[in-house]
Image: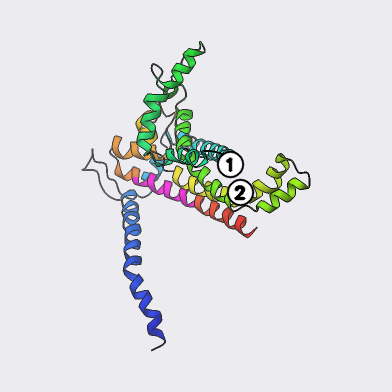
Amino acid sequence: MQGQAPRLIPRLLMAPAIGTLLLWMIVPLAMTIYFSLIRYNLLQPEVSGFAGLDNFEYFVTDPAFGSSVINTVLLLGSVIVLTVGLGVGLALLIDDPFPGRGLVRVLLISPFFIMPTVNALLWKHMMMNPLYGVLAAVWKFFGAEPVDWLTDWPLLSVIIMITWQWLPFATLIFITALQSMNREQLEASRMDGANYLQQLRYLYLPHLGRSVAVVVMIELIFLLSVFAEIYTTTGGGPGDASTNVAFLIFKQALLGFDAGVASAGALFAVVLANIAAVFMIRLVGKNLDA
């Protein structure tokens, strides 16, 4: 008994926090599962009862479902490729000391702390507006017709906005990883006649492998729930051109007033996020083992 007491006390102290965390996760999930299995449309309160899998079938057969899944995959893939590629390039560019490097690093990281809605408004009105936006002024300066980005290229516009905000995060991770690089190994490679491209291939990129895996995993999980940029700028349109899974759930919940179908869509998003998370965690684990 005396030997068990020291082990029992830490568990008792941790129990309230663990219990609160479980309730925080389980109660919303349980309510979502419950609403996904019943008929609950705010415009038809008289229609109720057990719906079975009807809500899931209605969500999956929605005309916008296919395009929303494709848009989600395109958005995820494009943002991850751009942020990783540009992030590695920027990190390598400012890795060596130069006057004002600290200020440059602060400026590069700053966009990550801007709220998504503010980021969307900045790009919508200051950068991409076809009448008075910065990009329109550049187009006119070169004698070209300004592009109405949010109408002609809605999904690309959202990708640019999100890439601009998440690029500092990737750059910060890569800068931190480069700080731990063995400088003696770099000097030895230079003395052996290795050029910069050879150093990049055999030293820099293998060293950044773990950081790349971590950045991809974190971005993949968070970008599945992108909503503010789409709602603030394109509204999912024109048509369904920029609607992702998260915005489709919003349309079912608040525009269609169907809480049952929206809950079914939310469970679909949870399953999709967990599949992506498990895949990336295994990828990161293999990378760490290597």
Q: Quadrant of the C terminus?
A: bottom right
Residue farthest to the bottom, as pictured: 1
Spot occupied by residue 74 in the image (x, y as percentages of width and height):
52, 35
Q: Secondary structure at mark 2?
A: loop
Spot occupied by residue 165 in the image (x, y as percentages of width and height):
45, 37
Is 273 included in the stretch rendered in magenta? Answer: yes
Using the image as rendered, state which of residue 70 and residue 42 is in the foreground: 70
Q: Quadrant of the N terminus?
A: bottom left
Residue at screen point 35% across, 70% down: 14
242 sits to left or right of 39 = right
| Numbered disc total | 2
- Counting residues from the start of the chain, the first of labels 1 and 2 encountered is 1
Spot occupied by residue 115 in the image (x, y as percentages of width and height):
36, 39
Residues in magenta?
263-275
Task: Residue 238: tell me if it is visible.
Answer: no
Residue farthest to the right, as pictured: 192
Disc marking residue 88: 1
Q: Amino acid at mark 1?
A: Val
Marks 2 and 1: in contact by CB < 8 Å? Answer: yes
Using the image as rendered, state which of residue 236 and residue 127 is in the foreground: 127
127 sits to left or right of 252 = right
Residue farthest to the top, as pictured: 143
Crowd tier of the residue under label 1, counting other residues whose Cα lies within 10 Å: few below 14, some 14–19, many 20 or above: many
Is 168 included in the stretch rendered in magenta? Answer: no
173 sits to left or right of 42 = right
Residue 256, placed above or below residue 55: above
Disc marking residue 208: 2
Disc marking residue 281: none
Using the image as rendered, state which of residue 290 and residue 126 is in the foreground: 126
Q: Amino acid at mark 2?
A: Leu
